[in-house]
Amino acid sequence: MNYFCPDLINHSTLVNDKLRNKFYKDAIDKSVKDKVVLDVGSGTGLLSFYALAAGAKFVYAVEIDPQRAAITQVLLQANFDKSRFRVLNIDFWDRDHQNKFEYKIDVFLSETISAAIFCQGAILSWYAFKEIASDEFISIPDTFSIDVYEWHGERLFNENNTSMRGQTGISEVVEENTLDPRIEKTLRAFDKHYRNINYSAARWENPEDLPEPDKIYENALVVNVNDKILSPNFSLNFDETSTRTLGHICKMSFGDQTTYFKDWLCDSKYVAIFNVKDCSSVRFAFKNHPYHPSDNCESAMGFATNEYQPWTVVTDK
Ligand SMILES: C[S@@+](CC[C@H](N)C(=O)[O-])C[C@H]1O[C@@H](n2cnc3c(N)ncnc32)[C@H](O)[C@@H]1O
């Protein structure tokens, strides 16, 4: 097998993203002991590794990309008994694959999100997952939600401001290790360019640097694993019709544990910004874009760019 995987570099920001990984590891550590776990979109195998290390009875690691599935296989095989896991290189949304899961799933684990929160199909994965779930299943995360920040006027990120566009946020590469050395060993074997990225060095374009908003609409949208929603949408009503700038501050939760994407290192941290002119209400509707790596969507992860914006904005004058 050819282990070289130039594509792995795309996941460097993910596996080095301390806050993102901590959210999952904390949730996994308290939930998976002796449980059957499904990790949809296993990527390099990080979350499956956490689950097996935390005592999961059995882990299904599902990954659509063959090279990433191979990395998952090597990482898990090197560290855990092979009777405790199975790596499946399949498209999880393809219903023909449902018979590949002989155990009912107790814990559903997935990080198929993006800056626009639903771009990679997290909701589609929830729908497919429920067909093979045990009665008492849990999902990590169990809720996605959006706060909306409002600034008066269009002084922020108006159409002439390109500061947020196409940025990766990675300005510096440092040697400091942030990963479990066992994980890093496998990643380096696959990708000689694999980098360990320092979290703080990458924060120069962080949305936390946005000025204080004039108003915050907390939980303008909340979608829970138990809701039957395929295309999320939400509305805001305003007291007066002035022009304003609105930002989607996305987050996800597991129980009382919440993480804001804007605090992360990886691309999902970007905050989608909208200008709405002289309106009394605005409705955001998500075009339920079925993410698929082969559709060339990976380079369009839902940034607030003109090129790709999955949220449709409808205003009422
Ligand atoms: C954001 S990455 C997360 C990787 C890893 N779980 C982690 O947290 O580091 C999402 C992964 O989901 C995979 N993926 C997307 N859609 C999928 C599908 N329908 N079936 C299986 N894997 C999928 C992508 O190829 C990608 O590797």
Image (cartoon, rainbow, N blue to C red):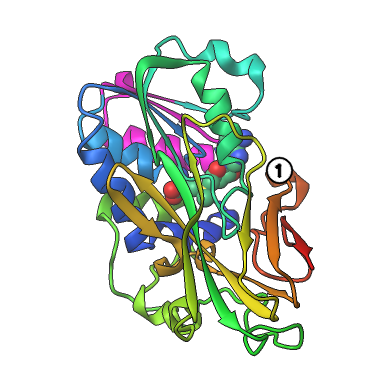
Residue at (48% x, 51% y) in the render: 145
In the picture, measured across the screen, residue 92 lies left or right of residue 277, that is left
Q: Is residue 190 left or right of residue 121?
A: left
What x and y, as percent, mark residue 207? Answer: 49, 77
Q: Quadrant of residue 46?
A: top left
**For the point 63% across and 28% down, which residue is it?**
93
Give x and y (percent) for residue 251: 44, 56
For the question of whether residue 191 can be seen, the reply is no
Q: Residue at x 41, y 66 (%)?
A: 264
Q: Which residue is mark 1?
A: 288
**Looking at the image, residue 271 lies above or below residue 30:** below
Magenta region includes residue 75: yes
Choose top left, top right, bottom left or bottom right for residue 174.
bottom left
The amino acid marked with disc number 1 is Asn
Residue 166 at what x, y percent from top left? Answer: 67, 75
Rate crowding at label 1 as few (under 14), some (14 to 19) or many (20 or more) other CA atoms within 10 Å: some
- The quadrant in which the N terminus is found is top right
Give the answer, above or below, for where 68 lies relative to 170.
Answer: above
Magenta-tinted stretch:
57-86
Q: Nearer the viewer, residue 255 or 92?
A: 255
Q: Is residue 230 above or below residue 105?
A: below
Check if residue 244 falls in the magenta segment.
no
Residue 88 visible in the snapshot: yes
Looking at the picture, how far across and down is residue 313, in whole percent? 74, 61
Q: Secondary structure at mark 1?
A: loop
Q: Is residue 133 above or below residue 119?
A: above
316 or 174, nearer to the observer: 316
